[in-house]
Amino acid sequence: MSHHNRTLEKMGEAEPQAQRSVGPVLTTGLCADAIVAAIQAENAGVSIQCQAGYLRVLVPGRCRVTAAAIERALGRPFLLPRDLESVMPSFKGRMRVDQVSAIWEAGPR
């Protein structure tokens, strides 16, 4: 991915609008832990599903995380989108990412 501002979409199961959750799937490790902490600090209703080797982070309707929040949790610089892409094999929802933040949103149904 070479663009600095992108919109991507992955389709999930059919869910009622109010219950559709979105967010990243992250490979486990220090970066994933920092991303999860930053998402929890910036969003309400965060749920985490732990699977073998990865974490599925889900937020109802819209999930936003900033590079600054991840850097605070990680204790070192974190470059969006590059560093996120290296630990995010998948995601649910429609995603927009630039150098400041990543946003996952439920698409229209």
Image (cartoon, rainbow, N blue to C red):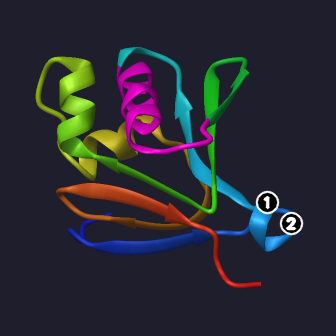
Instruction: Residue under label 2, please give it.
Output: 15
- Apparent side of residue 22 relative to residue 78 in the rendered image (left or right): right
Count of marks overlaid on the render: 2
Which one is in front, 25 or 35? 35
By secondary structure, the bulk of the magenta-drawn segment is best described as helix
Dividing the image into 4 quarters, which one contains the C terminus? bottom right
Which one is in front, 50 or 62? 62
Mark 2, secondary structure of its residue: loop
Residue 30 vs 27, above or below: the answer is above
Do the residues bearing badges 2 and 1 touch, measured as CB atoms within 8 Å? yes
* Residue 42 picture quarter: top left
- Apparent side of residue 12 relative to residue 27 in the rendered image (left or right): right
Q: Which mark is residue 19?
A: 1
- Residue type at numbered disc 2: Glu
Q: Residues within 10 Å of mark 2 (few under 14, many from 20)?
A: few
Please give the range of residues in magenta: 31-46
- Apparent side of residue 4 relative to residue 86 in the rendered image (left or right): left
**Which tag is nearer the camera, tag 2 or tag 1?**
1
Q: Residue at x 44, y 15 (%)?
A: 29
Q: Residues within 10 Å of mark 1 (few under 14, many from 20)?
A: few
Task: Provide residue 48's location: percent of width, then percent of height.
Answer: 65, 29
Task: Provide residue 76's location: percent of width, then percent of height.
Answer: 12, 22
Residue 86 vs 104, above or below: the answer is above
Dividing the image into 4 quarters, which one contains the N terminus? bottom left
